[in-house]
Structure formats: structure tokens, C-alpha cells
Image (tube, rainbow, N blue to C red):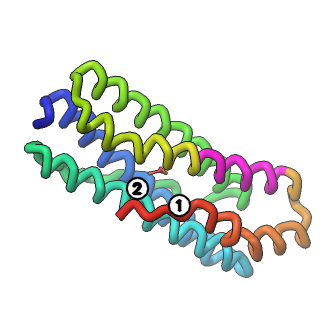
């Protein structure tokens, strides 16, 4: 059974995952209208779907542990970006903030002696290590490429291979 404090904190994470999904959906849509960035477009659409799965996993857990998942209202995410680099910088900042939030949940689970939730959260801890790693790799590549069109072409072509390392289904 979840404590009220744990339940509220997990619901906060539902919101965060939903916001992540929306933010990456906006990036995907933006990339889709930037001619030629097919790989980046697919990457963000796929990432948005993954965030939704992260949210669903939390919703089911909260409900199964005697709580009630709250389906949140969402603010409109950023719609336009100055560059591919800008979008990936946002992704990186976002993932670091999510990791901090997950760590905070782990702290609360320990304070509450809620070992079931602590165990559940380990999947998210591992996932965040992977998400931050991926975001850093991609951002480093983009910073090296800068405005080089050939480099951006190759980045767009190869991004789904890099992203494939990130595949461990949360379902
Ligand atoms: Fe849900 O991991 Fe990214 O935000």
C-alpha cells in the first residue's frame, strides 16, 4: 500500500513523463517540417512514445498499489527550435531533470520504508542512466558537427542506430 506522500510523489512523476512525451512530440513535429531530417524526426517520435510508456507504467503501479493515478493537464511545450543542436540541448536538460526527480522518488521510498516502490523505481534509475548517456553522446556529436551540412546529413542518417542501443521496452 502506498503512503499518501509516496502516491503524490509518484503522481508528480506521471506528470513529468507526460510532459516529456509532449515535449518530444513537439520536437518530432518541428523536425518533420525541417526538410531532410527524417532520422531526427523518427528519433523524437519514438522517444515521445517511450515517455508515454514510462508514464503508463507509473499509472499502473500507482493503481495496483492501492493509490489513484492522476491524469494531469499539460502545458503547451516549446514548438520551435533554433537548430537541431538547440532541440538536443533541451532533450539533455530535460533528461537530467527527470533523473533528479527519479532520485528524489527513491529517497522518499527509502524514507517511507516502501521497498516495493523502491524496487519498482530501479527500472527508472537504470533507464535514466541510459537516457542521459544517449543524450550526451548525441549532443557531443552535434557540437562537433556544428553547421557542417555533410556532418548533419550523417548524423540524421545514423541517429536511429545510436538510439537502438537505448531499446529496453518498459511495457
Ligand atoms: Fe522517462 O525518461 Fe526520458 O524523460
CA–CA distance in space, label 1 to label 2: 8 Å
Residue 28 falls in which quadrant of the image?
bottom right
Residue at the spot 46% in from the left edge and 40% down from the top edge: 125
Q: Nearer the viewer, residue 76 or 50?
A: 50
Indicate the quadrant containing the N terminus: top left, top right, bottom left or bottom right: top left
Residue range corresponding to the magenta coloring? 132-143
Q: Which mark is residue 76?
A: 2
Residue at mark 2: C-beta within 8 A of ligand 1: no
- Mark 1 near mark 2, Cβ–Cβ under 8 Å? yes
Q: Nearer the viewer, residue 55 or 19?
A: 55
User: Which residue is drawn at the image coordinates 34% and 32% (left, top)?
Assistant: 105
- Dominant SS type (magenta): helix
Q: Which residue is mark 1?
A: 79
| Image coordinates for residue 67, horizontal then vertical, percent | 11, 43
Give yes or no for residue 140 being in the magenta stretch: yes
Viewer-proximal residue among 99 and 25: 99
Secondary structure category for the residue under label 2:
loop
Amino acid at each position: 500500500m502506498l503512503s499518501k506522500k509516496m502516491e503524490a510523489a509518484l503522481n508528480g512523476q506521471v506528470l513529468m513523463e507526460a510532459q516529456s512525451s509532449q515535449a518530444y512530440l513537439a520536437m518530432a513535429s518541428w523536425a518533420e517540417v525541417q526538410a531532410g531530417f527524417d532520422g531526427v524526426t523518427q528519433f523524437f517520435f519514438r522517444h515521445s512514445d517511450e515517455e508515454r510508456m514510462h508514464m503508463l507504467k507509473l499509472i499502473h503501479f500507482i493503481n495496483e498499489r492501492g493509490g489513484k493515478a492522476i491524469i494531469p493537464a499539460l502545458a503547451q511545450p516549446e514548438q520551435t527550435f533554433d537548430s537541431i543542436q538547440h532541440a538536443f540541448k533541451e532533450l539533455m536538460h530535460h533528461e537530467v531533470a527527470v533523473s533528479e526527480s527519479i532520485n528524489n522518488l527513491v529517497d522518499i521510498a527509502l524514507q517511507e520504508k516502501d521497498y516495493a516502490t523502491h524496487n519498482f523505481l530501479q527500472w527508472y534509475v537504470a533507464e535514466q542512466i541510459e537516457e542521459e548517456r544517449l543524450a550526451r553522446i548525441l549532443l557531443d556529436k552535434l557540437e562537433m558537427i556544428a553547421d557542417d551540412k555533410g556532418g548533419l546529413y550523417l548524423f540524421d542518417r545514423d541517429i536511429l542506430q545510436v538510439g537502438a542501443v537505448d531499446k529496453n521496452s518498459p511495457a
